Amino acid sequence: MSTQSEDPAIDAAMDVPPDPREPMTEVQTVRLRELSEQTGEPFTEELTEWQAEQRIAELEGRIVPV
């Protein structure tokens, strides 16, 4: 009996999280720009994916639902 998944649709090499040092994605850029405008916080494009993820979560926490 094997301990690894026998499902050929699962590629273990692709089951790796993205490199957190990569520049933020276009989706993150758009979301961060929107949140920065809504909260009056400065916007910077020089964030990594990980930093953008953290900043988005922080800014989303500041928005008061209407």
Image (cartoon, rainbow, N blue to C red):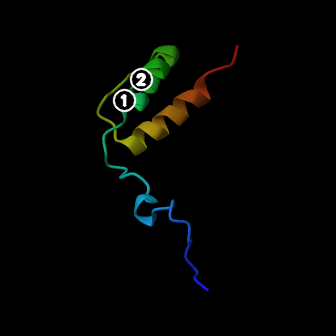
Position of 4 relative to 34 (above/below): below
For label 1, the residue is: 26
Residue at mark 2: 30
Q: Mark 2: few, some, or many residues within 10 Å (few <14, many ≥20)?
A: few
Corner quadrant of residue 48: top left
Secondary structure under badge 1?
helix
Measured from the top left, where is residue 19 in percent x and y? 35, 52
Image: 42 above or below 14: above
Q: Is residue 28 left or right of residue 65?
A: left
> Which amino acid is tagged 2?
Val
The extreme bottom residue here reads 1
Q: Secondary structure at mark 2?
A: helix
Q: Position of residue 50 (x, y in %)?
A: 41, 45
Q: Is residue 18 above or below residue 54?
A: below
Q: For the point 69% across and 18% down, which residue is it?
A: 65
Which three-letter amino acid code belongs to the residue tagged 1?
A: Glu
> Residue 45 occupies which quadrant of the picture?
top left
The residue drawn where x is 51% and y is 15% is 38
Q: Quadrant of the C terminus?
A: top right
Label 1: how many Cα within 10 Å (few below 14, some 14–19, many 20+): few
Percent position of residue 56, x then y? 49, 32
> Pointer 1 and pointer 2: residues touching (CB < 8 Å)?
yes
User: At x 31% / y 45%, what residue is drawn?
Assistant: 22
Residue situated furthest front in the rendering: 8
